[in-house]
Amino acid sequence: MHELSIVASLFEILEAKARENQATKIVGVRLKVGKLAGIVPEFLESAFDSYKKDTIAAEARLEVEEVPLKMRCRKCAAEIEREDYSLVCPSCGSTDLEIIEGMDLLLDKIDLEI
Amino acid sequence: MGARKMAKKEIVVREEILGSNKKIAADIRARLEAAGVLVVNLLSSPGSGKTTLLERLVETLKPTHPLAVIEGDIETERDAERIRRKGVPAWQITTGGACHLEAKMVARIIPEIPAETQFLFIENVGNLVCPASYDLGENLRCVLLSAPEGDDKPKKYPAAFATADCLILTKSDLVPVLPFDPERAAQEALEINPRLRVFVTSALNGKGIAELVRYFIESRANLIQRQRHA
């Protein structure tokens, strides 16, 4: 339940980007949320909607794309997507896997009006 | 003069939202590594025995290794007071409601840490979900799981276990009276994260404390060696 503090960090970036681009408003915000980022998209959306009032993003629409957990096997180089968090390679059984996607919380794109 | 025409523009940002936390954490890590301090971040749900384990660690380490403790809680100075009673410098961060510590909260305390400090333990706010997303500048992240919580937790709260370096099973003295299988708990956690070092401990009877202390001392020795080669 730390979605509100994440939204606060998000707005720091949004406001900086709006200034840099001399935008009058932000109309769209697109996020990529890793499956293992520990974030509930619905909570993020409600936090965003209450935070955005009286900001440059007051009319912005938030889109949240969930990014599945993707790993690469360090032994056989197979790329693996899993739902159950088991870090075992289905091709060779190795447990030496590297997580390559699905941990992060990214601000992907912003739509501005200038 | 007509109204200015509105232009729409899409900007590709691709920036980590918690990037500023990561940056502050990296600064903390660099500063403390250079000073020879090993930083340990302790994560768990409330009541799994973080503070009691810390009291045992403090008692064991203090005679030979200067250490300091940062306590994170939503309210009260209680935990820091418990550590201070053991004669070790301790700072309390009260988040006033926030469910996790952030690097900037830790950064404010760093200048006050005594120069001779070798270990800094940070006890995070009791919560197995949110603290996992925030790097505090630690060298080791330890997740605690106590016997009464049940051995099925790792897969229910995967992020904490996936991002940890070590798993500390606590309250093992209660295992005889609980349907808790330490091996099953360890197995679940290792399936999520095969790199985890696992310790079975009891703050009550002292089981596993010496092994855990040795692990921290070895980790610090490795850190200092890496510093010398750098």
Image (cartoon, coloured by chain):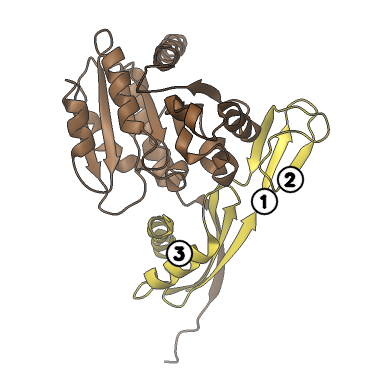
Chain colours: A yellow, B brown
> Mark 3 — on which chain does it sit?
A
For the residues carrying marks 2 and 3, which lies nearer the camera in this image? 2
- Give the CA distance from mark 1 to mark 3: 32 Å
Label 1 neighbourhood size at 10 Å, few (<14), some (14-19), many (20+)? some
- In the displayed structure, B57 sits above or below A6; it is above
Residue B114, quarter of the rendered image = top left
> Mark 2 — on which chain does it sit?
A
Specify whether B75 is left or right of B135. Answer: left
**Viewer-side residue, A60 vs B148:** B148
Query: Is residue A56 visible to us here?
Result: no
* Relative image position of residue B84 (x, y in whole percent): 17, 26
Q: Are marks 1 and 3 in contact (CB under 8 Å)?
A: no
Specify whether A111 is left or right of B83. Answer: right
Label 3 neighbourhood size at 10 Å, few (<14), some (14-19), many (20+)? few
Which residue corresponds to the image point at 33% horizontal and 19% vertical from the top-left? B37
Amino acid type indicated by mark 1: Pro
Please name the residue that numbered disc 1 is placed on. Answer: A68
- Give the CA distance from mark 2 to mark 3: 37 Å
- Give the CA distance from mark 1 to mark 2: 7 Å
